[in-house]
Amino acid sequence: MHQLFGALCLVLVIEGLLLFAAPKAWQAMVRQALTLPPHTLRLFGAGAVVAGLVLLRWFH
């Protein structure tokens, strides 16, 4: 459980760094994402989950 909270904290740090370093690019990305259909966003989300699980398994 401790590792899960550590991982979630790292996600917050990475997301915060993206917003801090490139807020205009982040806004442009969100605007573009708003134009995509939900099915496409769901596929991107599923791909990110699968990639994260594969990388997690590979590094452990």
Image (cartoon, rainbow, N blue to C red):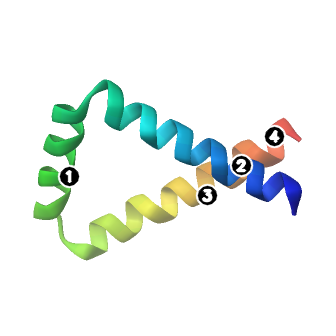
In depth, the one of 49 and 4 nearer the eye is 4
Give the Cα distance between marks 3 and 2: 16 Å
Classify mark 2: residues with Cα within 10 Å, few (<14), some (14-19) or many (20+).
Answer: few
Task: Identify which residue, 38 or 27, lies in the foreground.
Answer: 27
Looking at the image, tell me whether mark 4 or mark 1 is earlier in sequence order. Answer: 1
* Quadrant of image for the C terminus: top right
From mark 4 to mark 2, how far is it between C-alphas?
16 Å
Answer whether labels 4 and 2 touch (C-beta < 8 Å).
no
Residue hosting label 4: 58
> How far, Cα to Cα, is label 2 from label 1?
24 Å
SS at mark 2 in the image: helix
Nearer the observer: mark 4 or 1; the answer is 1
Q: Nearer the viewer, mark 4 or mark 2?
A: 2
Q: Is residue 47 above or below residue 39?
A: above
Name the N-terminal-most of marks 2 and 1.
2
Q: Is residue 22 left or right of residue 5?
A: left
Q: Are marks 4 and 1 in contact (CB under 8 Å)?
A: no
Q: Earlier in the sequence, mark 4 or mark 2?
A: 2
What residue is drawn where x is 45% and y is 42%? Answer: 15
Dot 4 amino acid type: Trp
- The residue pinned by badge 2 equals 7
Q: Are marks 4 and 3 in contact (CB under 8 Å)?
A: no
- Identify residue for label 1: 30
**Spatial separation of the CA atoms under disc 3 and disc 1:** 22 Å
Q: Position of residue 13 (x, y in %)?
A: 55, 39
Secondary structure under the numbered disc 4 in the rendered image: helix
Q: Which residue is mark 3?
A: 50
At x 15%, y 63%, the residue is 34
